[in-house]
Amino acid sequence: MQKPMFILVAGAAVAVVAAAAVFVFTGSPVVPVPEKEVVKAAAPQSATSQGSVAANPFNITGGVAAASETKLRPMSFERRQSVERAGFDAADDLDKALGQLAEITAPNERAAFIRGLFEHLATGDRKAAMAALNKFKDNDRATAATSLIDAWQPDARSRFQRDGRIEGFLGYALLDKDPALAADWAQQVLTGDASRELMNRAITDIAKQNPQAALEYGKDLTGKERADFLRRVATGWGQSNAEDALAWAGKETDPALRASLTASAVRGIAEKDPAAAAKHLTDIPAGDDRTRTIQSITEKWAGKDVAAAEAFIGTLTDATDQQTAQSALDQAAPVGLGVQIRPSRDGSGLVVQDVPDGSNTGLKTNDRIVAITRADGQTVDTTKDPRAAFGALRGSQPGSAVTLTVASDNGATRTVNTVVDRYPSPNGGSRFGFGGGGRGR
């Protein structure tokens, strides 16, 4: 009986200390709200470590009571608001704020204080906020970075899941708002692939608006890193000012790099104007750069005007170039029905997921295509092999007729006669999309 009494007394002392800390931060008294309920560990000695994890979810070390004997409750709304406000008010003097934070031992109160601090810092100079972030480590750093993300780009957490470190999330959160700051972050904070990927994306965006500023980031690079960097600049520059980008690329003294930069600029031009890009194709010699450029022009053109993309292929005189462009067209605007289709989970056929406005296929959402018969008489049972059905459509000639056996929700079947054609695929195509969202025409 003596030990539980001692623990309860110790727990009360901790609550008083926490309340006093908030009084110091806010400058006004705060009514103490019990934040900890101290209980005797229920786990047997043989399971001490397991009991400790359950009782100590924040991984606390030290303190008045042993971690295995402490169970934290969530902070009350009033306490959390008070501590966050204390952090917000302390942001004008970062050193003082860090001193105040050092006095807070409860992880949930530390998190609340840091959230308030960085909510305030996020409203000021962004570079200063990043500099402040570098003063934090581990969980405190993650809390701080998350606070900046929530302030600067609230949807970043759901949009950017490409890097396991919170610093990676922050870099991508900055990309849309401030590419230059994202580039700074890539250089100063991130390392390895995460740094290179973010820097590449940022540099392309910066070059669209200010090519000279973009070039400053790579002034100390050499060899392959320099070449890769300059190609990114050329691509971004080409999107915003084709003439200047091509003139700049032409000044490169290394012949191989000059050709590569020219190709990158042309691919940038293709992002907005495939027809203009195609006019510069004669400036690019045979090789990987020419192949990538033909692919880019074809894909961008197919997304805007399939007929124009097909006409572009007809202007190519080299067989290899034609094959490259045709493959790109097949990927960007595959032959299909122009509706979104996926295999059913129960193997009962191909389910129509989306029918775009203007589609004249005769299909409806939730229809199940159970068989496809092509113009050459080949029939595919989609309940047995969805991949074969995929190939049957993709392998058909644009404009050819197909007959579909379709089952409705009520189980009744009907025959749908339609025509396959090329349809631009959203996001570069999908595995079983048969033309993706498509457009009726």
Image: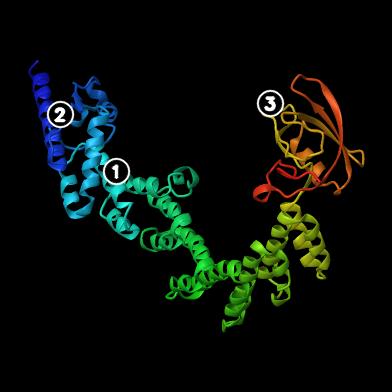
Return the x and y of residue 220 as percentages of the image width and height: 42, 75
Foreground label between 3 and 1: 1
Whether residue 75 is visible to the viewer of this picture, yes or no, is no
Return the x and y of residue 93 as percentages of the image width and height: 19, 54
Return the x and y of residue 378 as percentages of the image width and height: 89, 38
Mark 3: secondary structure: loop
Q: Quadrant of the N terminus?
A: top left
Foreground label between 2 and 3: 2
Q: CA distance from mark 3 to mark 1?
A: 47 Å
Amino acid type shown at disc 2: Pro
Amino acid type shown at disc 1: Arg
Q: Name which quarter of the figure residue 360 lies in.
A: top right
Can you name the residue that lies furthest to the front here? 28
Can you name the residue that lies furthest to the top here? 1
Pointer 3: what residue? Answer: 346
Question: Could you tell me which residue is drawn at 76 percent across and 56 percent down?
Answer: 305
Mark 2: secondary structure: loop
Q: CA distance from mark 2 to mark 3?
A: 58 Å
Q: CA distance from mark 2 to mark 1?
A: 21 Å
Pointer 1: what residue? Answer: 115
Q: Is residue 78 left or right of residue 351?
A: left
Question: Could you tell me which residue is drawn at 71 percent across and 54 percent down?
Answer: 303
Pointer 2: what residue? Answer: 32
Q: Earlier in the sequence, mark 3 or mark 1?
A: 1
CA neighbours of label 1 inside 10 A, class few (<14), some (14 to 19), many (20+): many
Question: Could you tell me which residue is drawn at 16 percent across and 41 percent down?
Answer: 26
Q: Earlier in the sequence, mark 2 or mark 3?
A: 2
Relative depth, front residue between 112 and 389: 112
